[in-house]
Structures are given as C-alpha cells and as structure tokens.
Image (cartoon, grey):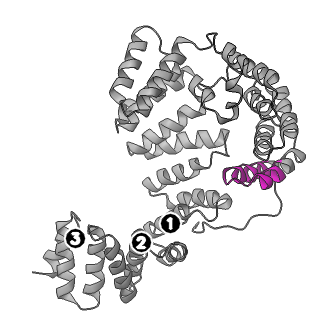
Amino acid sequence: MVSVCLVWISTAQTAEEFFLRGTSYMMQNDYIGAVKNLTQALNSSLPDQKILMKRGEARFRLGEMDLAIQDFNGANATLSDIADLWLARCYAAKGDNTNSVFWLEKHLRSDFRLPEDKIKKDSAFDKLQLSEDWFMLWQREWYTPEEKTLQEVDYYIKRGRPGDALNALESAVAKGINGPEILAMRGRINMDQDNYGPAISDFTSAINLDKNNTGYYLYRGYANLGAARYKDAVNDFTMVLRANPEMFDGYLARAEAYAGMQSYDQAISDVGTYLKYFGSDQHAIFLCGEYNFQRGDYLKALEYFNINMKNDPNSAAYFKARGKTFTMTHTHQYAIYDLTMSLDLEPSDGETWFYLGIARMETGDKAAACSDFEQARRLGEPRALEYTIDNCQ
C-alpha cells in the first residue's frame, strides 16, 4: 500500500530528474539552484530545447544576459523561433534596441507569437517602448482575425463580462472564424461558469482540430473534474503529464481525480511526486492527510496534519482536520480540543459541530453532544439528523 507522501530524494538522478528539479527551483525563484540542476540535465543527455529555454530564463533572471543569449540561441537551433521573444528581452536588457526589435519582429512573424497586449505590458520592454523602432514596429499588422477575436474576448473576461466574451466568440464563429483556440476559449468561459458539459464538448472539438496541444487536454481535465467524470479527468491529466512532466500542478489535479474514484493510493502517490519538489507546500501536505483520512489510515493522516499545525497553528481547517482524525482514532479529548479550537475560528462549520458531537457522545457528555448535533443540523450537516434520532430522543 502507498501511504507516504514525503519521500527521500534518490542520489542517482537522471537528466529528467535534474530538469524537473531545476524547473521547480525556477518556480520558487531560486535561479542559482535552477541553473545548477538544468546544467546537470544538459550534461546528462543530448541538448534539449526545453532545458535550454529554462536555463536561459534562469540566467536572464540572474542578469547573466550573455549566457542567457547563448542558451536561447541553442534552443533556436533545436526548434526554430522558439526563443525569439526571450532574445528580444535579453537585448532590451542590454540596451541594444536594434537587436531587440530584430528578434521581436522575428517573434511576431512566428507561430509562437504572444498576444499584443502581453508583449506591450512586458516590463522587459519598458525602455524600448520609448524608441522610434518600437513605434515603427507596431505600425504593421501582425495578428490574424482569430487572434484579434481572442484578444477582444480576453479583454471582456478580465473585466468580468463573460456574456460579452461569449457574444464575441459566437460572432466570430458565425463569420467562419472557428479555429481550435476559439473553441478552447469558449470552453474556458463555460468552465468558469460551471457549465462543464458544454466546456468538455468545446475542448474535445479543439483537440480534434489540434491533437498535439496539451493545453486543451489540461483544460478538459479540469472540466471533467468539475463534472465528476473522474476517470476521464485522470486520462486527460495523464496525457498532459506524459508530455510535460514539469507541469507540477497536474499531479495535484490528477490526485484529486484519483481521489474522486476512491483510488487513494494513486492519489497519494501523485501528491508525493509533487512534494518531492515542493516539500514545504502546506496545501499538498494537507491533501496527503486528507487522502489518508479518506482511505482509513488515520495514524498516517495525523502525521501530515501535525506538520500543518506546526507550520500554521491558527488555521480552522487544520484544527478541524486533525480533530476529525482524533475522533476516528478514539482519542476524544484531543478531538474535543481541536474541534473546539476550530469552531472558535470558524463557528459556522456544520461538519465540525457534527464531529464534536460524536467526540462528546463517546466521552459520555450526551447533553452537550445532542446540542452539537442540533447545531450541526441547523448549519446543513445532513448526517446530524440520524445521530439526533438515534441518540437524543
């Protein structure tokens, strides 16, 4: 049985392991650690554009522009144009406007181009934007009708106007502008409004048009998760992680899907993979406790909730989780203490009142327990009524 989330790191590391650890350091803003591990990844295998891109970004963040340029040129040699935007950023940081605009123009001509507003809001180009070269660059039209529609839709979404966003998409579809990005964007809006069925349909249509875009599988995975289609969600997240094992949030998402299937061993294993790289992440530690609780391994669950409590001793959620677990291990005085502390911080949680009632009933305090069950019932805890009928009539 798998019940351990926090794992020891093997000393025999592969190129992929160095890459994943380097990427995790990037996400935690440890750019020196990122460069060290990504260099090990390159030394352990043939040059790979993903590794070079990550190391180039880390060197950029460290201000090592010449070294970053070397990495981005290497990435471009492997996959043409993939690093053009980063090269533009590097030369802008060096004050070389001519080369910066050169690479930015190459980026705008490529299939990798970002939306116009993302480029114009990029702080790397703050000084470049004062130049004549920048002004002249944007006198040309770089974007397709589909990209312009997506930019308009993004504008509406950021301003909390999903109806206008959907209208803009429907108008584009009516004009024959119905590429996979349009469909995926409509899916994202539907998902944000909890319309999971239409969202799944949109993402599936986008995938049928572009089967190599793992982003569509990721979004469909979240939509399947929202629709409680857990097996389908697992399949989508697995597809994403197979292609992009550095997409660490995917492990937590797949763990949630496994938990929905009551496959707690697999859920715990996925959270363990995440914690291998983000060992102090309190949410992931909490999930380990939750999944162990759900599979009935209460002693193991306590280990994780104790870690949570040590790091944040004023969390109602952590007191509640540990109190529930103490209830299940029949250490009722500990349970009463934790659950009471949780209610001091969050008095309107019906489930906490319910477990407090169980703990008090087990200690023989029937009057207090029945009061707790009644409070739990008033707050919408459905299990409280049965306990009241069985114990308090």
Residue 278 rendering spot, x and y as whole percentages: 64, 59
Q: Is residue 390 left or right of residue 311?
A: left
The span picked out in magenta is 16-38
Q: Nearer the viewer, residue 14 or 104?
A: 104
Distance between the alpha carbons at the discs numbered 1 and 2: 9 Å
Mark 2, secondary structure of its residue: helix
Mark 1, secondary structure of its residue: helix
Magenta-colored stretch includes residue 315: no
Given the image, on which type of amino acid does mark 1 rest? Answer: Phe
Residue 287 rendering spot, x and y as whole percentages: 50, 63
Q: Which residue is mark 2?
A: 321
Q: Is residue 40 left or right of residue 142?
A: right
The circle drawn on residue 376 is 3
Q: Residues within 10 Å of mark 2 (few under 14, many from 20)?
A: many
Q: Which residue is mark 1?
A: 286
Magenta-colored stretch includes residue 23: yes
Given the image, on which type of amino acid does mark 2 rest? Answer: Ala
Given the image, on which type of amino acid does mark 3 rest? Answer: Ala
